Image (cartoon, rainbow, N blue to C red):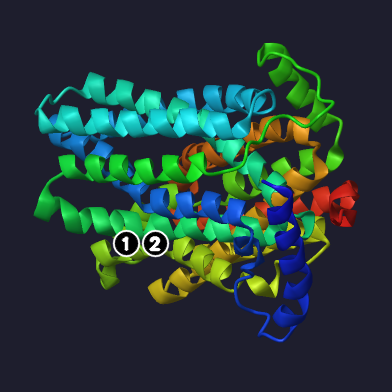
Amino acid sequence: MDTSESTNQEREGESEGPRRRGRRRWVMDTRPLRRPAYRRLWGSTVVTAVGSQLTAVAVPKQIYDITGSSAWVGAASLAGLVPLIVFALWGGAVADTMDRRKLLLITNSGIAVTSLLFWLQAFAGLESVTALMLLLAVQQAFWGLNAPARNASIARLVPTDELPAANALGSTVMQTGQVAGPLLAGALIPVIGLPELYLIDALALCVTVWAVYRLPSLPPLAGTAVRRAGVKEIAAGFRYISGHTVLLLSFLADIVAMVLGMPRALFPQLASQTYAPYGEGLALGLLFAAIPIGAVLGGLFSGTFSRARRHGLMVIGAVVVWGVAVTGFGLSGNLWVAVAFLALAGVADMVSMVFRGAILLSAATDEMRGRMQGVFTVVVAGGPRLADVLHGTAGSAFGPRTAVAGGGLLVVAVMLVLATAVPALRRYRV
């Protein structure tokens, strides 16, 4: 980024304040989009948010069509999770040792090639579950390398006071993709066929590669020691977290919310038992869609909270509201009331994501941001899967509604105890 561009951005930032104050402050804060570099990164996310969901639907659909077994679908999910965890941790260390723009170019190109290979095997009628699982593992490995670099780059593209707004913009797009992508996939499969979903994703990723190519260079900052990304650097990242209470608590807050309070494993049972009078199919669809829809609404109205400076307190409040909403969902016998509580949980989850992301970017030094984002990726990917096991077991033992309500109450209790016992998070402000 040249000097004149930086000067223009600074002038835009200075003039934005008075104009923004004249607007209604509850709408999404779009100030980061005035910065060309962030706008390109965000634009690439817009393109891939839906495209990646097409592949996310196509892979399990193809596996089920080949095997007729949901167990194989579950095994494929595990095949993708393991490389995601391993390469996200390593990718975080890599992102701290090399030009992040270059890493994004390599990994996005790798994901695009993988999507093209998905299309080729489907077009050729290979019908090999082994090939699908190998391709899925490779794709998730590239994604694990990509996510830390992408998220860590944001702090180099926008000023600190705009980090919550930037996180809200990115999270809203991803949540919208989780709603629109599966719906679009369901509509397209009968019309164009399953293989073409992979091809659409591959073409969308080409746009992403072009957008990333136009980003400024993002090498390690001057004065940062040159090092190799190995086990030693990954371990250094965990030591860094353990030595910074605010960072540690931000991760614990998400683990508490997701592991104790994510009830999606019980949605099928609730749809077939508690909400069966409304129609099992309708109930199941609404339950799965409610949280992402709430998160999207939270993002669209993120202007109501994105300027808050007490980031730690916002995380604590969001996790408590999540727990209360999940408890309300568990106690609800009416489907529409249950959906409303889940949507409220989605709003709370969006607030939590925005400020946890801002804390990770503002409280960590640039040479550690990649590794922090690597751990963040693992927590986000692994927490809900652990919740599936926990809630599935508790639902079988105590009944689904009791398990959901109990999990929500545990979220509230544990989060309040953490906030009281360790005040660092609630006192943290940007």
- Helix, strand or loop under label 1: helix
Give the residue pinned by disc 1.
Answer: 285
Q: Position of residue 330 (x, y in %)?
A: 51, 62
Pick the front one: 368 or 261: 368
Residue drawn at point x = 49 percent, y = 49 percent: 398
Q: CA distance from mark 1 to mark 2?
A: 6 Å
Q: Position of residue 308 (x, y in %)?
A: 78, 67
* Residue 205 location, quadrant: top left
Q: Position of residue 101 (x, y in %)?
A: 58, 35
**Label number found at residue 289:** 2
Residue drawn at point x = 74 percent, y = 25 percent: 237
Determine if residue 355 is in view.
no
Determine if residue 190 is in view.
yes
Residue drawn at point x = 25 percent, y = 46 percent: 200
* Residue 364 location, quadrant: top right
State which quarter of the image contains the C terminus. Answer: bottom right
Pick the front one: 198 or 130: 198
Pick the front one: 380 or 88: 88
* Residue 306 location, quadrant: bottom right
Q: Position of residue 229 (x, y in %)?
A: 66, 16
10 Å crowding of disc 1: few (<14), some (14-19), many (20+)? few
121 vs 237, left or right, is left
**Label number found at residue 65:** none
| Residue 122 to residue 5: above or below | above
- Helix, strand or loop under label 2: helix
Q: Given contact means CB atoms under 8 Å apart, are the residues at marks 1 and 2 in contact? A: yes
